Image: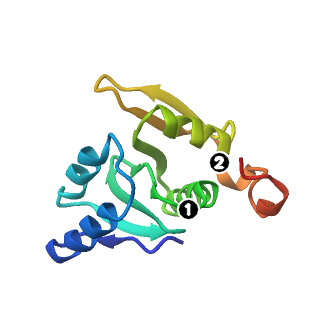
Amino acid sequence: MVPFKKITPSERQAIETFLASQEEKPLLSAIKTFCHNGETYYAIVENMLVMRQQREGTYYFTMPYGHGQLRYVLMQLLENAKIMGCKCTIVLADKDDTRAIESSMPKHFTITNDANGTFTAHATKDFSDSVFNNNESMVPAW
């Protein structure tokens, strides 16, 4: 299970440092804004920063940010949401991110275009029924 930690003022500095070390991305300011919500948790998974908020039985994860294996991060987020009895939604994604999500985990997410120009990926498959569950090495990372 992913060890998410509550974001405190001192943790924000570490997050800002991590974000500064990554390449610039159009949604970076939105990711920083997400970080400043009082009920936000974060984790570094496979060298990628993921933030999480929970509302109404759904975990809202930011698009994993950084350089790592996106497929492994998404699998862990799906598993984390299932264990906690929540739906899994990825927010603050751009067009390139949606292609990466679909190529990493085909047919596991439905992508919607939000009014503000970002995309949201809603998990549509249960990870436990996935070909990826316990077969990660059999499926190529695209």
SS for callout 1: loop
Residue 89, x across and y down, in percent? 45, 44
Judging by the rendered image, the residue that carries numbered circle 1 is 68
Question: Local crowd at mark 1 within 10 Å, few (<14), some, or many (≥20)?
Answer: some
Give residue 46's mark.
Answer: none
Question: Local crowd at mark 2 within 10 Å, few (<14), some, or many (≥20)?
Answer: some
Q: Which colouring convention does the figure follow?
A: rainbow
Disc 1 residue type (three-letter): Gly
Residue 49, x across and y down, in percent? 41, 62
- For the residues bearing labels 1 and 2, Cβ distance under 8 angstroms: no
Disc 2 residue type (three-letter): Asp
Total numbered badges shown on the rendered structure: 2
Q: Nearer the viewer, residue 50 or 2?
A: 50
**On-image quarter of the N terminus:** bottom right
Mark 1–mark 2 distance (CA, rounded to whole Å): 23 Å
Q: Earlier in the sequence, mark 1 or mark 2?
A: 1
Residue 136, x across and y down, in percent? 76, 61
Residue 76, x across and y down, in percent? 57, 62
**Residue 56 appearing in the image:** yes
Judging by the rendered image, the residue that carries numbered circle 2 is 126
Side of 110 relative to 132 (left or right): left
**Residue 105 appearing in the image:** no
Side of 14 relative to 88 (left or right): left
The residue sitting at 43% across, 69% down in the picture is 44
- Up the image or down, 123 lies above or below 133; here it is above
Q: Nearer the viewer, mark 1 or mark 2?
A: 1
Side of 113 relative to 55 (left or right): right
- Up the image or down, 66 lies above or below 118; here it is below
Side of 91 relative to 1 (left or right): left
Q: Residue furthest right?
A: 138
